[in-house]
Image: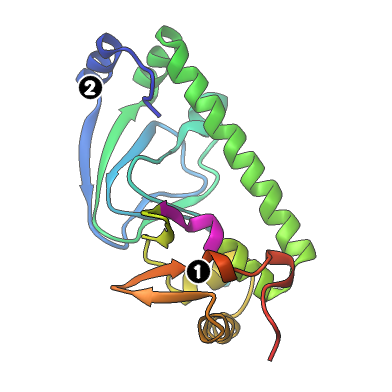
Amino acid sequence: MFAGVPDAQLEQIAKVAFQRRVPRLTTIVRAGDSTDSLYVLISGGAKVLNSDEEGREVILTLLGPGEFFGEMGLIDGSPRSADVMSTETCELLVITKNDFKRCLAENFDLCLNIMKSLVRRLREADRNIESLALMDVYGRVAKLLLDFSEEERGERIIRRRLTKQDIAKMIGASREMVSRVMKDLENQGYFRVEDGRIVILEKRVPAPGAAAARP
């Protein structure tokens, strides 16, 4: 978010921002609330989700260190569009609405970074809609694993903790189906679990449209 922002402007932002620590499974913001602050994750993780009156949830995305949320409502003045809940203990940097708008007015690089983030999220939403419409569960699971992987020493690693329940809520499937698909993909050598992390074997990774040979 602050890439390219001059040191002098960063110092001004640091003066108005404050830190907040939240325990695991804390609702940081709630859908429908008025938008009064921007949040940046310093450490920990969080999930962005919506739920219906019956308690069924859909996870829109998972957030990690360096990522931020709450900017949309600050820009258009709308209430919060989703809940954000910590998945582990989080350290947050908080910038209030008035300070955030002043920072935007004074720094082009910050505005550009925000615009890039909004475009990225729109593209991600388009891809997710496409996958829900065109892919089966195998394809959706494969796509999600690829999306959350990062290159590390020539391998693609998923550092974040992804539970099968969270995967199910992100791709619109049951936990039982996700468990079966994950087991099939692992048994067929598409990934391995190593020190609690998922290592994707790129030479064998399936195309998301035809993820694996169905049992």
At 57% from the left and 72% from the top, the residue drawn is 54
Which amino acid type corresponds to the residue marked 2 in the rendered image?
A: Ala
140 shown above or below 104: below
Distance from Cα at disc 2 to Cα at disc 1: 41 Å
Asked which quadrant contains residue 100, the reply is top left
> What residue does disc 2 label?
14
Is residue 148 one of those drawn in magenta?
yes
> What residue does disc 1 label?
201
At 79% from the left and 64% from the top, the residue drawn is 134
71 shown above or below 144: above
* Residue at the far bottom in the pictured view: 215
**Badge nearest the viewer, 2 or 1:** 1
**Is residue 71 visible in this depiction of the protein?**
yes
- Residue 22 rendering spot, x and y as whole percentages: 24, 51
**Is residue 58 visible in this depiction of the protein?**
no
Magenta segment range? 145-151
Which amino acid type corresponds to the residue marked 1 in the rendered image?
A: Leu
* Residue at the far right in the pictured view: 134
- Residue 138 rendering spot, x and y as whole percentages: 66, 75
Q: Quadrant of the C terminus?
A: bottom right
Q: Decide: few, some or many residues near mark 2? Use Cα within 10 Å; few <14, some 14-19, many ≥20.
A: few
At 34% from the left and 18% from the top, the residue drawn is 99
Marked residue nearer the N-terminal end (2 or 1): 2
Does residue 70 appear left or right of residue 195 in this picture?
A: right
Classify mark 1: helix, strand or loop.
loop
How many numbered marks does the figure carry?
2
At 57% from the left and 86% from the top, the residue drawn is 184
